Amino acid sequence: MYLICIIILLELIGERAMPKISIIVPIYNVEKYLDRCVRSLCNQTLQDIEIILVDDQSPDDCPRMCDEYAKQDSRIIVIHKKNGGLGYARNSGMKVATGEYVAFVDSDDYVDLDMFESMYNSAKKYDADFVRVDNYKERTDGAVLNQNYVPPMHEGVYNQQELREKLLYTQLGLNPSDDGSKYVSCSVWRNIYRKAIIDSLKLQFVSERDLISEDIPFNIDFMMSCERAAVINQKFYHYIVNEKSLTQTYKTDRFAKELVLYYELIRRSKECGIYENCKLRLERHLLTRLRMCIKSEMVGNKNSTVAKKNIRIMINDTTIRKITSTYPIFQMPIKYRFVTWCVKWRWITPLWLIKEYL
């Protein structure tokens, strides 16, 4: 009897020792924003958390700042690693995470102080494997860009089938007739994930250097194994956008990487048995990314002659030609219909005239 009591006591101690949520923060060259981010985590109303700061060989003062934060708060764990990018930094954090749930926060963003308490309470209330909240979209000067945003999903609990149809499928792309308001973001920073599922599947992020959107494959693998999810239609997360990012992050290989992602998503969706349900969504996703690449060329490439040449190469790509030959363009909202017709018939001049509206 005495031995049994000791075992039970040890189990209870172990349960109490497990943080409710492990929050993983990849860090690279963000010393201007890091303090705001970390303070928003340290001051959470849910105190039983661990905060994992992953210094991805940041060239600024972030490594020292991380070590100072750890001295001030025992819940903070610091990892210093060789630079490998966002996906691998998150993987390093997951290796040491001990929480019941795992969350991800980008180091130039910040969160409301009751965010994780609200998410954890919802997870326990519904026994959810996954909880999603909404976010503010802010400029660096604090101006909110999505003040009138209407969430695309209803608040509540979703079973496995509903989770796939209303959340996972929509992350892979929109149906032809959907407007942009129906899109459900794939960003992992708006969610918490049950750690036991991550461990059982041995889930890891791919490198964004290999695949342009590392969040989507992670979500596919996780959500296909979920039994239940909860959605809270309240903004807690403050996502900071740089309005000049389109010109500052212009990359000549962007479209090539979008094609790699498209075929990777086809492969994964076929493995999961959902490809037939998502075929048009994946095509719409690539067409949307193509539109973004075209705009990036128009805005980010200072040589208009070269930009037009690159756009011509993109719209003449065999994958794009194949998609536009069969895609039901007439079902699309007018704005997207016009752009897609221009792509199909290779009309570059009209695209250039409406570049501000792409």
Image (cartoon, rainbow, N blue to C red):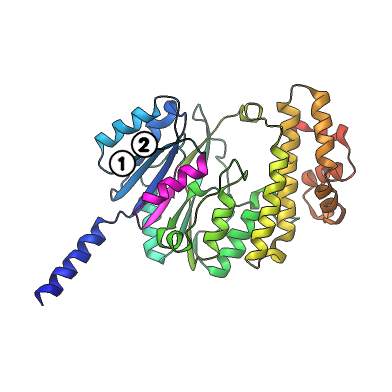
Q: Is residue 257 above or below residue 325?
A: above
**Where residue 284 sits: x, y (%)?**
74, 52
Residue 87 part of the magenta segment: yes
Residue 151 placement (x, y as % from top left): 56, 51
Range of magenta residues: 85-105
Say which of 52 and 181 sits in front. 52
Give the mark nearest the N terminus, 2 or 1: 2
Query: According to the image, label 1 marks what residue?
Result: 76
Which one is in front, 18 or 115?
18
Residue 124's disc number: none
Query: Badge 2, how many Cα within 10 Å: few under 14, some, many 20+?
Result: many
Assign a secondary structure to mark 2.
helix
Marks 2 and 1: CB-CB under 8 Å? yes
Which disc number belongs to residue 38? 2
Residue found at x 67% / y 64%: 270
Which three-letter amino acid code belongs to the residue tagged 2? Answer: Val
Q: Residue at x 50, y 26 (%)?
A: 141
